[in-house]
Every structure is written in structure tokens, then in C-alpha cells.
Amino acid sequence: MLALALTPVFAADAPPAPAAPTGDYVENFDTLYNSLTVQRLGTMVELRARSRRGEFLESAVDQADPLKLVVEYTRTLYAAALFQPQPKRVLIIGLGGAGFHRLFAQTWPDALLQTVELDPKVFDLCQTRLGFKPTAQTPVTIADGRMFVKRDTTQWDWLILDAFRGGYIPPHLKTKEFYQECAARLSDRGVFISNLHEGTELFYSDIRTIQSVFSQVVLFNPPDSGNVIAFAVNYKTPAITDPAHWENAAGLTKLFKGKLDLGYVSGEHIPIPDQAVATATVLTDDFAPVEFQNVVKSNNETKVPSGGTTIAP
């Protein structure tokens, strides 16, 4: 299990990245937590994480259209609006390239979008390479996500877990105990959102572990991504498993001014694979074999997820 950062580390503690080159470029950065690649081709800038399994796309921003949601699964995160359409306080664990943040800030300008990011270099590159400009409504805290949730007492309307290191979420962010801490930080109609990877034994344990904490869980599968986004709530009624109880997707779509179609996203809803989940292991702080399960393939699919998209072998 990864060591937890007991005190916040601020971005100023990391050496600043040199100014971005002009034109197209590829840069590599190694940090205590990540091996990162930033690549610009035309107006598109990608942030990728390197590991022994290859390179994984963490985020991408089209600098000609910063509100565009380039990475497929970031669109699906907004399905949270189908269950809680008026988020006033949102916590996202994992900054990446802030591909999610720009559209959120335009859509709900008075809401707080608090980000927690472990790696100061990610925050630095997000600003110097991907053009993210944090504001009072979109602050970033450099700290371990679990420690932030444990110490913070805010009640969040959306709590998004999107923290990856080279294609996987750190084990201490995938246990029953952590999910219980997240559940305690939700508002009455708050939604917990987690970006999962399908195609391994870990996927089924993820779902079962989330089910062991939350009253209701629904899954959305962005097409051809390898990602599955889980949405979970503490309440039992209304039944979010029934699309008839969701907010009107067409009405919500108008909020995004042509940048997102929630009707399309709602069509990504998939059933929970109950049979496989029923026999899966609940992950706990004492038993979280995340890396082992992550390489045990449960089928022959070759899809690899964003925040996870394979770039090179």
C-alpha cells in the first residue's frame, strides 16, 4: 500500500516546469509519484503517465476549444447531474489536465469545485502546459486524497474519484473503509462517482466494494473507452437504478451550451454484472490486492481505459 501524505505538499515545493516550448513538442518529467509525458500536436495537448505497462492518457485539452471534453469518460462524469442536477460543492480527487474543470466552471459558475492532487508536478504542468487557471471557485490542494477526505468536514454534492497513477488507482483509495469515509462526506442527495477499469478481476471487486457501502449503485460505460463510471448514493428512494427517476436529460443538456449531450450520455447506462460481482472480493484496508487483481484478466477484451488509454507498449 502506498504511504499516505500526512501533511499537504504545496505546488511551490516542487521545482517549476520550464516555459513550454513553442510549436509541437514532447517533454518527459519524472516525479516522486509519476513519470509524465506532455505532448503537443497542433492545438491538442496531452498529459500521459508512463509505467512498465506503457503510456496511459491522463488528460487532453484542445487549446483552440478548451471547453471541449476530449477524453470520452470525462463526459460521462457529468451523468452525476442526472441524480443531483444542482451541485453547489464538488470534490474531485485527481487533477490530471483539468479537462473536466473548464466546462464545469462555465456551467455552474457559482459552485465550488475543489480538487485534491497528490503530485505537485501535475498541478504545475496543468497550468504551464494545458492552460488551466485555478480560481477561488476551482481551488487545488496538493495532498493525499484520502487524508483530505478524512480531515475535511464539507458535505459534497458530487464526490469524484479520478486519481490514477500509470493506469491504476492507488490501493488505499479503493477500499471499503475509504468509501465509508466518502459516504460520510456526501450531502443528503450527494453522489459518489468513481472511474473504474473493466476487463480485470479488480473491476468486479470495485463494484462489490462500492455496493457494500452505498445503498444504490449504477454503472455507465463510455463507448470504446475501457472505462466504467460508477455512481453511488446513500439513499434508497428514489431508485436511481430506474431511468424514469432521473432528471430530464434534454433540459440539463441546455446548460452545457452545445458542449455536452446528456441524452447521449444517459444511453451509456449498463446493468451491473451481478453474477461476477457476487463472487468478487470486498477490498478492505487489510486486504486490497489491487495490483494482483488488475492483471488477472476475466475475459479476452483488449480495451484499455482512458486514465488508462494505452499509447505505446
Image (cartoon, helix red, strand yellow):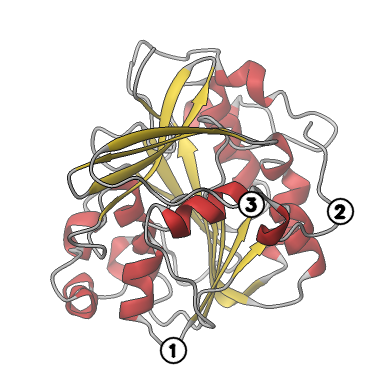
Secondary element at image label 3? helix
Task: Tell me the distance, in whole angstroms, between the alpha carbons under discs 2 and 1.
Answer: 31 Å
Left or right: where does residue 177 sit relative to residue 38? right
Q: Residue 260 location in percent, x, y?
A: 20, 64
> Are circles 2 and 3 on residues that touch, CB within 8 Å?
no
Left or right: where does residue 91 sit relative to residue 86? right
Q: Quadrant of residue 39?
A: top left
Secondary element at image label 2? loop
| In front of the other: 61 or 262 | 61
Please state which amino acid type lies under the numbered disc 1.
Answer: Asp
Residue at position x 68%, y 51% in the image? 14
| In front of the other: 93 or 218 | 93
Position of residue 7 relative to residue 108, above or below, is: above
Q: Residue 259 location in percent, x, y?
A: 18, 66
Please state which amino acid type lies under the numbered disc 2.
Answer: Leu
| Nearest to N terminus: mark 1 or mark 3 | 1
Residue at position x 35%, y 68% in the image? 102
Residue at position x 61%, y 26% in the image? 280
Q: Judge depth for marks 2 and 3 and give the one in front.
A: 3
Task: Tell me the distance, in whole angstroms, between the alpha carbons under discs 1 and 3.
Answer: 26 Å
Task: Tell me the distance, in whole angstroms, between the alpha carbons under discs 2 and 3.
Answer: 15 Å
Secondary element at image label 1? loop
Q: Quadrant of residue 226?
A: top left
The residue to which callout 3 is attached is: 120
Position of residue 37 relative to residue 160, above or below, is: above
Q: Residue 35 location in percent, x, y?
A: 56, 30
The residue to which callout 2 is attached is: 6
**Residue 94 in view, yes or no:** no
Please state which amino acid type lies under the numbered disc 3.
Answer: Pro
Q: Quadrant of residue 206?
A: top right
